[in-house]
Amino acid sequence: MSTTANEQPAATSEEAEAALTPREWGSKPWKRPFLVALARTGNYAAACRHVQRSYTYAMDEKKDDPEFGSACKEAELVHADFLEQVAWRLATVGEQQRTVTTTTKRDSSGEVVEESTTVKEGLRRSDRLLERMLVAHKPHKYGDRTTISGDPDSPLQVEIGPRVLTDEMLAKVAEGMMETGLLGSGSENGG
């Protein structure tokens, strides 16, 4: 698979071509390259540009020709499978990442006295992506296990806690911080 600037991860044309069911399109040979482009990019507008057809024309063909409509759905699924392969690679193997950090120290007058640059390189995996893939593939094991029960004849009542801290909540937090020594008493802080 290849990735080009400003595009989604895409399969090569050969991979997309091999993944699609062979079909003959008779007097409309543009349909095969359209489907290959759709399988590569997952984008109808990009596929239309590739075969120099208008979006409207392609959508009309999809609607009017059930076999072409079915082939478009297949191309979408092929693209989704390619994206899943990319996601799996990013979640398990990772992607190369380079981080450059520049630190500047200044004296009291603002003049630069020292400047250093740190470069870190390595693979970055996506634990969140892996988690989402596990939930999608095995929802019974990794999915949300929340159950909602109650009388089917009564309206469901859901209570959601406050979204902002109230003065009472802030007071409890401050009290806990003072007890653990994370926050001094008011007199120590000039209050």
Image: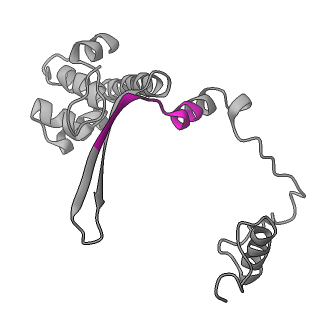
Instruction: Tell me which residue sits at (81%, 63%) in the image.
Output: 156
In the rendering, at what x and y percent does residue 160 appear? 74, 67
In the rendering, at what x and y percent does residue 112 appear? 22, 60
Instruction: State whether residue 149 is above or below residue 179.
Output: above
Residue that sits furthest to the right in the current view: 151
In the rendering, at what x and y percent does residue 191 appear? 67, 89
Instruction: Tell me which residue sits at (73%, 30%) in the image.
Output: 140
Quick one: 152 or 147, which is closer to the camera? 147
Instruction: Tell me which residue sits at (44%, 26%) in the image.
Output: 84
Quick one: 94 or 39, which is closer to the camera? 94
Q: Quadrant of residue 158?
A: bottom right
Quick one: 101 or 41, which is closer to the camera? 101
Residue 112 is inside the magenta segment: no
Give the residues drawn in magenta, as a range: 117-132
Q: Quadrant of residue 144?
A: top right
Residue 119 is inside the magenta segment: yes
Q: As drawn, is 94 to the left or to the right of 57?
A: right
Is the N terminus in the top left, top right, bottom left or bottom right quadrant? top left
